[in-house]
Amino acid sequence: MGKKIFGKWYFILIGLFLLSVSAVYAVFQEDSYIAVHDNLDLFVAQFQMLKNTGSFFSHGVDVPFLGGVTRDNLPSELSLYTLLYFIFPSFWAYIIGYLIKMLTAVICVCLLAKEWYGAEYEQCRPLAALMGLVYGILNVFPAFGIPFASIPFALYLLLRIYRRPSPGLYLLLFSYPFISYFSYFGFFILAYLFAGIIWLGIRDKKIPVSLAGAFFALAFGYVFFEYRLFYTMLFGGVETIRSTMVEADLTAGEILAQSVDVWLHGVFHAESVHDKFVLWVCAIYFIWLNGKYIAGKKIKAMFGDIYNLLMLVLAFNSIVYGIYNWGAFRGLVETLAPPLKGFQFNRTIFFNPFLWYGAFFVVLQRIYAYASEEGKRRERYMFRPAVYGMALLAMAIVLLTPSRYNDLYFTCKNKALELLKGKEIDEMNYREFYSEDLFARIKEDIGYQGEWSAAYGFHPAVLEYNGICTLDGYLGFYPQQYKEDFRKMIAPALERVEASRLYYDNWGARAYLYPGTDLSAVSSSKSFMVTDRDLYVDAQAFEDLGGTYIFSRFELGNAKEAGFSLVQAYEPEGAPYAVYVYRRQSGEA
C-alpha cells in the first residue's frame, strides 16, 4: 500500500503545494499583498461593483463608473472567473481563481500529454503533472489566469476531434469559452485553427471536415458565452476610445529589436520568466537537435519535428508583436477588416508562455524517454533525477522571481519582514488598499446617496469597490464622446504636463484626475505624496458631468479657488492614507 501511495509522489507534491498556498492565504487573508496594476485597480473592483449594484446578470443597465457605461462593456457572466466573484467575497474569489488556475493547468497538461503520447504517457505522467504545475504557477495576468492555463485543454479537444470526433467532444469545445476569453485567446485560437485546416487541406488534398466542424463549434461557443462583447462590437453603434488610440509606428530596426526582446523576455501580462533557465535549455537542445538532423541529412524530418514547430510558432508570435507597431501594416489590416480597428492582434504573444514550457516539457520528456530505453541502466539513474530536478528548478525560479503578479512571493516576503523584523511595509495590502471600513464610515458621515464623484491621489477603483459612483475610471472600451467630455474637466492639468496629455489623448483608458506637476497622482504605497497639492480641474465641467464629491488623498492647497469646499477630513490612526472629502458647490469659482 505504501509503495502504491508513494508511487504517486508527484500528486502528493502537487497536493502539498496547493495546501501550503491555501494555508498562506487562510492565515493572512485580506492582509495579503496583491498586485495592484491592471488588477486591484481594474477587474477586481469592477466585479465588486457588479455585486454592489446587483448587475452581474442585468441587461439594459449602466454601471456606476466613467459616468455610467453599459454593463455589456464588462466581462460576461457566462465565465467561470466572473461567477467566482458572484458567488464568493471578492478576496476569496481572487484566491480561489488562483488555485483553480493551477489545478486547471495540471489537469489540462496531463490530458494533452496523454492524448499526444498515447501508450508512452504512463512513463511520462509524473513529468507531465510536474510541468502542469510549473505552467500553472506562472504569474500571468490574474483576471485571465484560467484562460492561460486552459490553452492545453483546447489543443487536447482539437486533437481528439481530429482523430476521433464525437458529439460529446464538439459539445465540450462549444463550452470551452466558459474558461477562456475571446479578446485575449479565442480570436487567435480560431485563427490558428483556420490556418491549420488550410494547411492540412493542402497536405492531404482534402478538407479535414472534423476540424472544420470544430471551428464552427468553437466560434459559436464564443458568441454564446461572450454575447455581450459580440453585441457591443457588432450592434453597439457607439464610437469607442479604441477608434482613436494612437499606436507606435516603429522603424524596421526597432520592430526587429522589439520582436527579439519579447522572444527573450515576454511581456508583463504574460510573464513566463523563461529567460532565466527554460530558454537556455530549449536553445541548447534546438542547436543539438537540428545539428544532428543536418549531420544525418534528414532535412525533411527536421521540418516535421514537433519541437521545431513549437520554436517556429514562438518566433512567429514574437514577430507579429513587433509588426503590430508597423503603422502601414496595421493600417492595411484595419482597411481590410474595419471591425479590427484598435484590436491588438499582437496578443499572439500571450501564447508564448505555454509554448516555452511546452517546448521545455518536450526536451525533458525526450531525455526521460532516452534514459528509459532498455539496457540503459546507468542513464536511468543519471538522467531521471536530472529531469525531475530541472522541472523543480523551473518551478523554484517562477516562485522566487519577484515578477509583477507574484502575489505569493510578495505576501510571504512582506509578512516575513513584518513578523520577524518588525519592519513596516510601505506597500499596501489588500485590506489597506480598499479600506472598506474607512469608506463605510465616510459614506455614513456625509450621508452619501449615490452622487457622482472622482478620486484624487488614489485609484478610482477604490471608490468603485466601496460603492461610490465615479466619473473617473479605468476601462479599455468606453464611448469616445465621454472621453472628450471628461477631457474638458481635466484639461487644466493636461495643459501643464505634456506627458500626461499624450498619455490621455493617445490612449485614454485611464480617465483619472491628473496632477499639474507629477506624472501620476496614484500609488499603492503609503508614503506617496505629490509635489504640488493644488487640484487642476475645470470645476464647471465637473459639475456639467454631474459631479458632486472629490475624494482626495491629500489636503488640496487651492480647494476654494478651484471651486470646492471641504466637507470632512479623515486621518484615522492606523489607516494607510488620509481622505479629504470635497464638495462642488454650484456657482463657486
Image (spheres, helix red, strand yellow):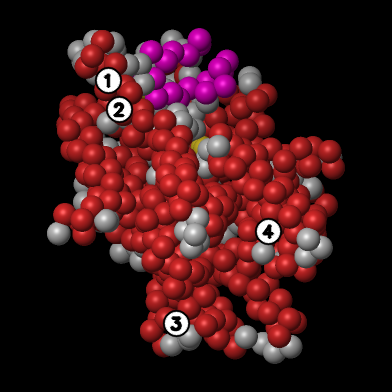
Question: Is tag 1's residue or tag 4's residue first in the polypeptide sequence?
Answer: 4
Q: CA distance from mark 2 to mark 4?
A: 39 Å
Using the rendered view, name the quadrant where residue 76 is placed. Answer: bottom left
Q: Nearer the viewer, mark 4 or mark 3?
A: 4
Q: CA distance from mark 1 to mark 4?
A: 44 Å
Residue type at mark 2? Answer: Cys
> Which residue is labeled 4 in the image?
308
Q: CA distance from mark 4 to mark 3?
A: 29 Å
Mark 3 vs 1: CB contact within 8 A: no
x, y (%) of residue 163?
A: 52, 83
User: Label 3's element?
Assistant: helix
User: Label 1's element?
Assistant: helix
x, y (%) of residue 268?
A: 54, 38
Mark 2 vs 4: CB contact within 8 A: no
Q: Tell me if 320 is positioned left or right of 471 in this view.
A: right
Q: Nearer the viewer, mark 3 or mark 1?
A: 1
Disc assigned to residue 416 = 1
Q: Tell me if 112 is positioned left or right of 276 in this view.
A: left
410 lies above or below 1: above
Question: Is tag 4's residue or tag 3's residue first in the polypeptide sequence?
Answer: 3
Residue 236 or 334: which is nearer the viewer?
Answer: 334
Q: Which residues are magenta?
A: 515-532
Question: Is tag 2's residue or tag 4's residue first in the polypeptide sequence?
Answer: 4
Residue 458 or 264: which is nearer the viewer?
Answer: 264
Disc assigned to residue 170 = 3
Crowd rating for badge 1 (residues with CA inside 10 Å; few <14, some 14–19, many 20+): few
x, y (%) of residue 519?
A: 57, 21
